Image (cartoon, rainbow, N blue to C red):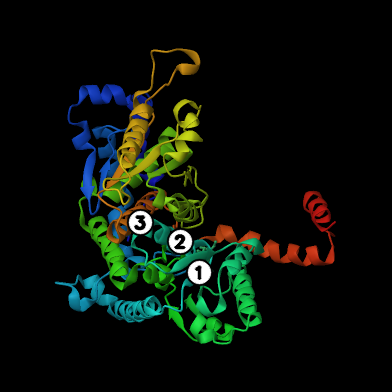
């Protein structure tokens, strides 16, 4: 596989020229006035997700050059290498196969491509574990004594299942409550423990490595609480979700659902880490979630680049970050059940692509991951949209709207949809007939994703779409999107500082850390 970093391609130079001639001064209002087909040209249906990209600062010529950039970088080969199980996570020498978790079993595939045959044993193991995990989920669902499920995990072992359980609240089984404890701040666990009873609680200890200090501290405290309350049956009330079965056993847990080192933490909601979701929405719902994601995988794997939604979104990300110089993207889900979606995407994009060296370790001469941030609409409108409309920075916004409401209170959904449409319209049109404080420059870009309904399948497709668009920009940037060395240093230093907090020894520390240590101890 021959990959070429974006800045080493002729298309990169061509894009810079295009940006300097037309790109910088591109005006959306002029573009719509000049082209009656702009909406059709820049919108498309992908599995479960319709996307209108027409309100972005892009014309057909630029999109063509971006597609050429993708070809020159070897994006298709890189994608195919991922879907063949090659070890594309080079710094950890691992394959990247979260997509395999949503692949149907070989027996149900009409014709399996050769690459699938080469990972047949992994696929068989995926389905053995999935069947066991879903059987367990159904057992918990049928068990009226278990009313509370407490997931203890952090990062990918929290954000994915939490985001999905909240997003699919309409499908959650009545009579079961779900709690997510991630922070080592004891207030979080303590407040959950106040609400639950030993005999009615199932603790899920979710950790890929089973070594993460926050999760282990919370897990130990939960176990101590359980025993202090008279609980004895750990086998019934604790299960582990981990690649490290030995460590889970050593902790005293006999029921462990495993997964594999080729599943990154932030890509793990499809694995055993999804057990809280499986309990919440049942085996059928969880299989639909996987199936929706698989449809998006197939779209990404097979659609021509020009009609490939993850590719088109990832190329826009590169255009905005490296040519327009936009530093962030705001995520605006107009569905309150998607309230954890921005937090989920923060880890997905920023832990994957927040890198300053390429896959070979060479320093990059261009910018990578934007900052992602956002809140559900319409709440964001009354907090920070002021800055989106009139601030000095241009922030591309990615709206998500859902056509069919889940709640049926009269009038609400029309008002919600009116707001999301109006915000996208206002960002683009601006208001230029009023001066001073009332002037809106407009020409502010946005993408608009539409789901017909928020279902397990459409959520699966939406999340897989986001995973693959992150792959696209990371691939063009030449970085390894699947490691996360940047989280290590803080973890190591925290161990040293913890000992110093206990002993009061500030010797050899920088002046600020020593001063703060004193203040926090006093
Ligand atoms: O923050 C670093 C990280 O390794 C994430 O990538 C991961 O999702 C999280 O910690 C939790 O890790 P684990 O599942 O091993 O506890």
Q: In this view of the protein, can residue 293 be seen by the observer?
A: yes
Comparing labels 2 and 3, the label whose residue is closer to the camera: 2
Q: Residues within 10 Å of mark 2 (few under 14, many from 20)?
A: many
- The residue located at (64%, 60%) in the rendering is 489
Secondary structure under badge 2? helix
Taking depth in this image into account, of 473 and 436 the one nearest to the observer is 436
N-terminal label among 1 and 3: 1
Question: Can you identify the residue that label 1 sits on?
Answer: 151
As drawn, the label of residue 463 is: 3
Q: CA distance from mark 1 to mark 2?
A: 9 Å
Does 299 sit above or below residue 142? above
As drawn, the label of residue 249 is: none
Give the x, y percent position of residue 4. Answer: 36, 51
- The residue located at (84%, 62%) in the rendering is 504
Q: In this view of the protein, can residue 244 be seen by the observer?
A: no
Question: Can you identify the residue that label 2 sits on?
Answer: 162
Q: CA distance from mark 2 to mark 3?
A: 13 Å
N-terminal label among 2 and 3: 2
- The residue located at (53%, 81%) in the rendering is 248
| Mark 1 touches mark 2? (CB < 8 Å) | yes
Does 116 sit above or below residue 474? below
Horizontal relation, residue 330 to residue 460: left or right: right
N-terminal label among 1 and 2: 1
Secondary structure under badge 1? strand
Q: Residues within 10 Å of mark 1 (few under 14, many from 20)?
A: many
Taking depth in this image into account, of 6 and 92 the one nearest to the observer is 92
The quarter of the displayed image where residue 334 is located: top left
Residue labelled 2 has its Cβ within 8 Å of some atom of ligand 1? no
Secondary structure under badge 3? helix
Horizontal relation, residue 292 to residue 268: left or right: left
């Amino acid at each position: 596989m021959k990959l070429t970093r974006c800045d080493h391609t002729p298309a990169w130079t061509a894009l810079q020229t295009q940006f300097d001639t037309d790109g910088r001064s591109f005006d959306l209002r002029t573009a719509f006035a000049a082209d009656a087909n702009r909406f059709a040209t820049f919108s498309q249906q992908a599995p479960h997700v319709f996307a209108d990209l027409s309100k972005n600062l892009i014309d057909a010529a630029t999109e063509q050059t971006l597609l050429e950039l993708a070809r020159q970088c070897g994006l298709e080969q890189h994608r195919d290498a991922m879907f063949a199980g090659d070890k594309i996570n080079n710094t950890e020498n691992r394959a990247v196969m979260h997509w395999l978790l949503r692949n149907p079993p070989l027996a149900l595939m009409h014709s399996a491509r050769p690459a699938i045959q080469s990972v047949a044993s992994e696929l068989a193991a995926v389905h053995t574990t999935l069947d066991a995990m879903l059987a367990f989920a159904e057992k918990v669902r049928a068990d009226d004594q278990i009313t509370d499920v407490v997931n203890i995990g952090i990062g990918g072992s929290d954000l994915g299942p939490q985001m999905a359980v909240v997003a699919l609240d309409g499908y959650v089984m009545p009579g079961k409550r779900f709690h997510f404890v991630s922070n080592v701040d004891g207030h979080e666990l303590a407040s959950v423990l106040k609400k639950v009873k030993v005999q009615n609680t199932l603790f899920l200890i979710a950790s890929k490595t089973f070594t993460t200090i926050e999760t282990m501290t919370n897990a130990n405290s939960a176990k101590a609480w359980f025993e202090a309350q008279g609980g004895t049956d750990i086998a019934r009330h604790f299960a582990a979700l981990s690649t490290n079965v030995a460590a889970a056993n050593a902790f005293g847990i006999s029921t462990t659902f495993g997964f594999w080192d080729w599943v990154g933490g932030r890509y793990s909601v499809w694995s055993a880490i999804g057990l809280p979701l499986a309990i919440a929405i049942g085996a059928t719902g969880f299989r639909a979630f996987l199936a929706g994601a698989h449809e998006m995988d197939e779209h990404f794997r097979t659609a021509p680049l020009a009609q490939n939604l993850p590719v088109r979104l990832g190329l826009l990300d590169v255009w905005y970050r490296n040519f327009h110089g936009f530093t962030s993207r705001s995520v605006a889900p107009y569905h309150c059940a998607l309230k954890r979606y921005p937090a989920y995407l923060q880890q997905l994009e920023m832990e994957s692509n927040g890198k300053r060296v390429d896959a070979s370790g060479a320093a990059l001469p261009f910018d990578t991951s934007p900052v992602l941030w956002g809140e559900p609409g319409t709440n964001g409108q009354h907090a920070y949209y002021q800055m989106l409309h009139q601030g000095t920075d241009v922030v591309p916004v990615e709206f998500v709207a859902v056509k069919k409401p889940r709640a049926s209170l009269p009038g609400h959904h029309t008002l919600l949809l009116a707001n999301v449409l109006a915000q996208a319209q206002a960002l683009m049109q601006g208001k230029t007939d009023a001066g001073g404080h009332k002037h809106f420059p407009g020409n502010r870009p946005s993408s608009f994703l539409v789901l017909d309904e928020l279902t397990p399948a459409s959520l699966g497709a939406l999340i897989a779409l986001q995973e693959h668009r992150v792959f696209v920009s990371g691939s063009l940037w030449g970085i390894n999107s699947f490691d996360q060395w940047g989280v290590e240093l803080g973890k190591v230093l925290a161990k040293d500082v913890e000992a110093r907090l206990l002993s009061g020894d500030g010797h050899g520390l920088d002046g600020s850390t020593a001063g703060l240590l004193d203040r926090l101890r006093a």
